[in-house]
Image (tube, helix red, strand yellow):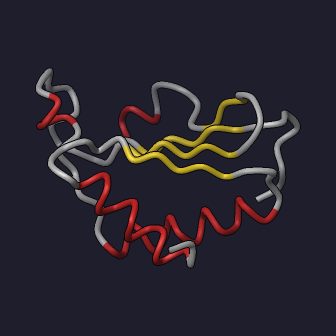
Amino acid sequence: MPRPAARTASLADRPAWLARSGSRIADVEWAWFANLHGHSDKWESKDIQQRFGYRYSDEELATWAGNVKRLAQDAAGTHVVFNNCYRDWAQVNAQRLAELAGAA
């Protein structure tokens, strides 16, 4: 992926219908930043456990690992934050992504 004209870009993984409501890539400050929310079918819920209750599969994480490695090639920094904050799913998914991306 080519480096954006701005110094940083932000990526967000969220339900498809929400992605249509605005740009998936927006200029921010200094590096690639990916915020992974998950794809809960209860995205509109006020209950945080329902809204962010999504655990990424190894297949999804392998895709993201490839994306992160490609982004990191041309970036000063690449950061990934999991916002699927139900149980320990964010931590488990982050550890697995690091393993798949070769960063663990």
Q: Kindly identify the residue that appears in the image at 53 percent across and 26 percent down.
A: 22
| Left or right of residue 8, residue 17 in this image | left
| Residue 50 in view here | yes
**Image: 46 above or below 38:** above
Find residue 3 and report its horizontal and vertical position in percent.
83, 50
Q: Residue furthest front?
A: 104
Q: In this image, 35 relative to 41: left or right?
A: right
Quarter location, residue 33: top right
Residue at image point 60% right, 49% down = 79
Seen from the viewer's position, the closer of residues 15 and 83 is 83
Q: Is residue 31 above or below residue 46?
A: below
Residue 15 in sight from this viewpoint: no
Task: Give x and y (percent) for residue 98.
Answer: 48, 69
Q: In the image shown, does 14 or 96 lie closer to the viewer?
A: 96
Tell which residue pokes out farthest to the right in this image: 5
Q: Residue at x 44, y 68 (%)?
A: 97
Front residue of 46/90: it is: 90
Quarter containing the N terminus? bottom right
In the rendered image, the residue lying farthest to the top is: 46
Q: Quadrant of residue 15?
A: top left
x and y percentages locating residue 95 in the rendered image: 39, 66
Circle count: 0
Residue 30 in the image: state x and y as whole percent.
Answer: 77, 36
Q: Is residue 34 above or below residue 99?
A: above
